[in-house]
Image: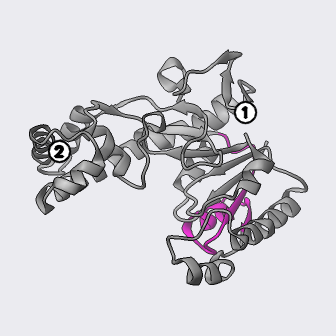
Amino acid sequence: MIIVCFVSGSGTNYERIVERDPEHDYVVFTNRPDCEGVKKARANNHVTVELSHVSYLKAARDRYGKAGIPRNCPDRLTYEQDVWRLIEEKVGGTPDLVCLAGYDQWLTDRTVDRYYPRILNIHPGDTTKGYAGLYWIPTAKAILAGDKEIRSTLFIVDKGEDTGPVLAQSRPLEIAPTLRHLESEGLDDLNRSFSRVVEFARQHGITSYEDFTGSADDKHKADIKTVCQSLQNALKKAGDWKLYPFGVHDLIARGRVKVVDRTVYVDGESMPPYGYRMELESSES
C-alpha cells in the first residue's frame, strides 16, 4: 500500500503505524516544515513533502481571524490543490490510504470528495456519543455524562467535524482504576480532584461540559483539567497508539474492510455505529 501520513507535530501516530508494519510505501506530508514528525520520516528514509500553509492563509486570517477561516474558503482550496499536486507527483498517482496523524488543518470538501472513504483520523473520545473537542475535552464530557470508561475512535473523514463513519474503537480504558494507577506512579491528588468534580456535578445536576464550564469556579475547572489531561495521556498510549496501527494494518491492509456510502463492513458484516471494537480481536498486538 501507499500510505500518506499528514503530520503537524511530533508524529507519534505515524511512528506507531510504521512500527506495526514498515513494509508499506510511506509518504509523510507536513504543513509545518521541519517539525518532529517529518524529521522522524527522514530518519526512516520515507518520502517527505513539506508545504507551509502560512502564506496561503495569511489573507484569510486577516479577513476572518485566526480561528474563523472557513473550511472551504478559496485560500484553503488553493493550498490543498498544491499539496495534492506535490504528493501525487511523489507517489506517481493517488495513495491507497491517507492517515491524519496529528494534522492541525481542516481538509476541504474537495479533498473529501476525491478521497472518501480512504481518509482516516483518530479522536481521543467516543464520537458516537458526541464527545467532540480538542485535547482533554472529550474525556471531560465522558466524565460529566457519567461514563465509567473512555475509548479512542478511528473514523473515516467526511465533510463534518469528527462525524465520519466509525471504523473501529479501542479497548475501553476504565477511569477509576486508571486514576489509581496514575496516582501510584506519582501523580498526586488525582482521585481527590476527580471526586470533587463528580460531587460538584451531582449537586448541581450537571451532565454536560457546557453546563459545567458555565457553573464551576476556578478550582473545579482546574480539577477537571488536571484529571482529564492525565487520563488523556493514558488514553493516547492505551487507545490511539494501538487503535491506529490496528485499523490500518489488521483491518484495512488485510482486506477486511469495505465501505459503501456510510456503512462500514468488516469481514463482510455491517458494523454498528461504534464500528469494530478491538476487544473482539484476540490476537491484536
Task: Please report the residue visible at 13 percent of the width from the left and 59 percent of the height from the top.
Answer: 217
Q: In the drawing, does residue 244 fall left or right of residue 43?
A: left
Residue 7 drawn above or below residue 35: above
Q: Which residue is mark 2?
A: 183
Q: Nearer the viewer, residue 201 or 94?
A: 201
Instruction: Indicate the position of residue 92 as horizontal and vertical percent values.
Output: 90, 56
Write the start and end of the magenta stretch as one range: 21-49
Residue 12 visible (yes or no) = yes
Q: Is residue 38 magenta?
A: yes
Q: Earlier in the sequence, mark 2 or mark 1?
A: 2
Asked if residue 172 lies left or right of residue 54, the reply is left
Give the residue drawn at x 80%, y 62%: 84
The reply to whether the magenta stretch includes residue 194 is no
Left or right position of 77 against 19: right
Is 5 above or below relative to 34?
A: above
Q: Residue at x 29, y 48 (%)?
A: 209
Q: Nearer the viewer, residue 242 or 95?
A: 95
Please identify the quadrant where the N terminus is shown.
Answer: top right
Dot 1 corresponds to which residue?
Answer: 253
Question: Which mark, residue 173?
Answer: none
The residue sitting at 73% across, 59% down in the picture is 46
Q: Nearer the viewer, residue 43 or 143?
A: 143
Q: Label 2: state its secondary structure.
A: helix
Amino acid at the residue labelled 1 = Ala
Name the kind of residue labelled 2 in the image. Glu
Q: Secondary structure at mark 1?
A: loop
> How far across and how far down the image is residue 228, in percent?
28, 49
Q: Position of residue 224 (x, y in %)?
A: 21, 51
